[in-house]
Amino acid sequence: MTKEITIEDLPGVGPKTAEKLADSGFSDLMSIATASASEIAAIAEVGSGTAEKVIASARGALDMGFETGLVALEKRDLIGKINTGSEEINKLLGGGFETSSITECYGAFGSSKTQVAHQLSVNVQRPVEEGGLDGGVLYIDTEHTFRPERIQQMAEAHGMDYKDVLSRIFIGKAYNSDHQILLAEKAKDIIKENNIRLLVVDSLMSHFRSDYVGRGSLSNRQQKLNKHLHTLQKLADTYNLCVYITNQVMSKPDMLFGDPTEAVGGHVLHHASAFRIYLRKSKGSKRVAKLVDSPNLPDGEAVFNIVNDGVRD
Ligand SMILES: Nc1ncnc2c1ncn2[C@@H]1O[C@H](COP(=O)(O)OP(=O)(O)OP(=O)(O)O)[C@@H](O)[C@H]1O
Ligand SMILES: [Mg+2]
C-alpha cells in the first residue's frame, strides 16, 4: 500500500503554507482541488502560478478525471436518505431527502418549510435502520425561527433524549447576506469534527432580497447568490451531506391559470437545486408537497400533516 498523500506533500506547499491553508479550512486534498487559484493564492500568500500548481497536483493526487457510468452508479450507493416523517413525502422523493445534493422547499408563510427543517434535524440523527444517518446538523438561521422547544417535541415523539439531540445541532444566526455566505464558507471544520450530514439554510433568500434592493443591484445579487450556492453544493459533494434550503415565493400577476406563485431567486437557484418542492397549506394541519423538479423522479404530489409530534402522514 502506498503512503497516503497529504497537503504537505504537494509541491510548493511547505509546513507553513500547509498551516495557513488548514487555518482557513483547506485541510484536505479535495478542498484544495476544488478551490479557485485566487482563493489559494490569497490564503497561502503565494503567487497565482504557485497556487495553480498546488491545485493541479491536488487534483492529480485525487484522480479527478472521468469516471464510467458504473463507477457513478457505485457512488450513488453511498447516497444517504433522510426520512421526512411522512411516508407519502418519502415516496415522492424516492426514499427521503438525499445527501450530496441541494433540496429546496418553497412556499408561502405557514406552508411548513421551517417545520420540515426541524423534523429533518431530528431525523438525520436517528440510526440508519430508522431512516436517519446518525449524523449531526448545521443550521444557518436567517429568520431567527429556529425553536429548540419544537426540536424537543419532535425528539420526544421518537423517545429520543432532547438534550442529546439539541447538542448535535449547530446553529449559526446570519445577520445579513455576507454573514450568511461567510457562515457557509467557514463550515468545513464543524462539519468534519461533528459528522454533520444535514445543512439547513432557512431561508436562503431573505437577506439577499433585503440587502440588494432595486433593479440595478440584481446582477450583483445573483453573482453573490451563485457563489453561495456553489459553496453549498461543494459541501454537499465533499462531505456527502444533505443541503436543505427554504425559499420564499412571489406572485406572478400576469398568470391566468393555475397557481400564480413562483420561487424567488431566478435561474441561478433553479439550476442549483437538484430537487425542488413546492409546499402549500391545505385545510387545518394538512399540507401538500409537490415535486416540481428532479433529475431522476417523476413529478407528483404528497399530502401530509403538521402535528405536535412533527411531520406525519
Ligand atoms: N407544535 C405544533 N403543532 C402543530 N402544528 C404546528 C406546531 N408548531 C407549528 N405548527 C404549524 O406550523 C406552521 C408554521 O409552519 P412554518 O413555520 O414551518 O412555516 P414556513 O413555511 O416556514 O413559513 P415562513 O415563510 O413564515 O417562514 C404553523 O402555522 C402551524 O400551523
Ligand atoms: Mg419559516
Image: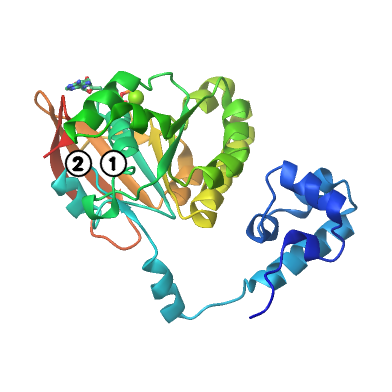
Q: Quadrant of residue 13?
A: bottom right
Is residue 262 positioned above or below 130 on the image? above
Q: Residues within 10 Å of mark 1 (few under 14, many from 20)?
A: many
Any part of residue 175 in sight: yes
Q: Which residue is mark 1?
A: 123
Report helix, strand or loop for mark 1.
helix
Between residue 190 and residue 39, name the one nearer to us. Answer: 190
Which residue type carries mark 1? Answer: Asn
Between residue 246 and residue 241, name the one nearer to us. Answer: 241
Q: Quadrant of residue 8?
A: bottom right
Q: Quadrant of the N terminus?
A: bottom right
Q: Which mark is residue 114?
A: none
Q: Quadrant of residue 160?
A: top left
Q: Which mark is residue 85?
A: 2
Residue, x 69% and y 52% (percent of image)?
27
Q: Position of residue 38 (x, y in %)?
A: 79, 49
Q: Are marks 2 and 1 in contact (CB under 8 Å)?
A: yes
Which residue type carries mark 2? Answer: Gly
Relative to 191, is 199 on the left or the right?
A: left
- Mark nearer the N terminus (2 vs 1): 2
Q: Position of residue 61 (x, y in %)?
A: 69, 71
Relative to 258, is 134 on the left or the right?
A: right
Q: Position of residue 138 (x, y in %)?
A: 46, 36
Q: Position of residue 286 (x, y in %)?
A: 12, 30
